[in-house]
Amino acid sequence: MSDDARFFAFLKNRIGLDVASVGAAIIERAVRQRCTLSKSADHDAYWQLLLGSPDEQQALIEAVIVPETWFFRYPESFVTLGKLATARLAQLNGVRPLRILSLPCSTGEEPYSIAMALFDAGLQPQQFKVEAVDISPLSLQRARNGVYGKNSFRGADLGFRERHFSQVTEGYRVEDRVRERVGFQAGNLLDPTLPVAQSAYDFVFCRNLLIYFDVETQKRGFEALKRMTRDDGVLFIGPAEGSLLGRMGMASIGIAQSFAFRHRAEQPLEPLSVVMTAPTPRPLPAEPLPGARPMPSPGLRPRSSVRPFAPLPPATRAALPPSPAAGEAATLLESIKRLANEGNSVEAKAACEKYLKHHEPVASVFYWQGLLAEVGGDVAAAQGFYRKALYLQPQHPEALAQLAALLAAQGDSAGARRLQERPARVNKEGRNR
Ligand SMILES: C[S@@+](CC[C@H](N)C(=O)[O-])C[C@H]1O[C@@H](n2cnc3c(N)ncnc32)[C@H](O)[C@@H]1O
């Protein structure tokens, strides 16, 4: 095992993090930082320190986690929650309050959004309670503090800020009525002794965690989530995370942009061809040999793209003067990301096409096209886009994770494994989102 492989294995074992999902460079940088901050002489000394120190283990975990989140991320899911919660309360007829879980909750934006959405849907405080869990005590500290800067407010509709926050010197503070409905605790989704894992919830939110796991760990995560979701409950996941659920006895509730699933009455045997609400996928093109670059599928080439997909060799790129269009390209990339994250698929797709028409193709645009196609239920097109992203950037972490999850959901576990095992070369372009 190489120097770095033991750190990769440690993180996978402790928190499920798959090196292919974030890229080796991110983990290597975190190890270097912790090595310096802990004044360890070298990686061997740091490894020994890590093994013997729970505090250092937590510090390394804090250094690699991705706490990215904001209020009302995927807004339609909160509208859906409000409607489902109202209907569920009517069924319960005052017997007990609704129980809701947000795992991972990161710095609190998701569980507070749940509470705000329920108040906005007309629920009274005593009618629900949100439990919020994350592996990062630092993030939980910020969540309990409840004060947020502008990065946490990214959607187009910020009316909720007027209704549920007060302005303070450092930003905006969540009002007490909302804070009191949310309880925070530290925990690991993969820990079977996790206190919240001993109960079942009416609504479970687990978004943007499983994308960082390999297929096997995703399965463990989904098993835990299934147990925590009542038989008549609903599980909300991230837009990129639905592929496996179809095979695990859960089915989409069929509300667009909500990414919400419930238990299927009969548990189907694996492998199941139904993936989310998507049509039956087309057969996959032949899987490339390990390490080989997948060829783009000409049939799936976006009509607007008239250029070859191969990027310019680095030397050629370095020799070119800075393009006057570079600023416009960067702005367009930002708006693709924003529109996609806001669930504005039509405009996000149009922005991708505009990008490919006017600029040299980049992996991240194909990745977003893949995600948008997947969200829209077109799994075959999504695969084509992910393959194009990987053709341009073979280590693009999100495209690798997405394509692997799609292949696994179609029963192609060998293909999925090959992608997961793709050598974690340092990606010189870094994360391209
Ligand atoms: C990208 S955030 C997602 C936050 C929120 N659910 C959302 O979608 O906006 C991912 C979070 O997962 C947490 N995390 C990573 N591994 C975890 C694990 N094994 N168990 C619980 N939380 C974990 C990280 O600390 C981080 O806060």
Image: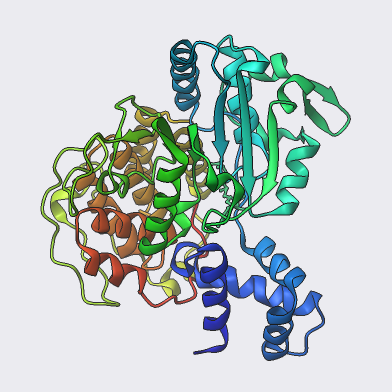
Question: Where residue 59 sits in the image (x, y, percent)?
Answer: 73, 66
* Front-lying residue, 342 or 415: 415
Q: Is residue 137 left or right of residue 262?
A: right
Give the camera-side residue of 422 and 180.
180
Q: Nearer the viewer, residue 244 or 26?
A: 244
Res. 131 image quadrant: top right
Residue at the location (56% across, 20% down)? 96
Considering only vertical position in the picture, is 179 above or below 1? Answer: above
How far from the left and from the top, in percent, is residue 124? 64, 12
Relative depth, front residue between 219 and 80: 219
The answer to whether residue 165 of the structure is visible from this angle is: no
Residue 171: name its quadrant.
Answer: top right
Q: What is the total number of numbered labels drawn onto the structure image?
A: 0
Can you name the residue that lies furthest to the front here? 95
Residue 140 versus residue 81 in the image, above or below: below
**Residue 241 at x, y = what percent?**
38, 46
Give the farthest residue toward the left: 283
Q: Does 117 sit left or right of 33 as displayed?
A: left
Q: How is the image coloured?
A: rainbow
Q: Position of residue 384 (x, y in %)?
A: 23, 52
Question: On the rendered structure, is 95 left or right of 150?
Answer: left
Say which residue appears at 33% left-offset and 37% top-offset. 375
**Above/below status of 185 relative to 55:** above
- Residue at point 33% right, 62% down? 390
Residue 364 in sight from this viewpoint: yes
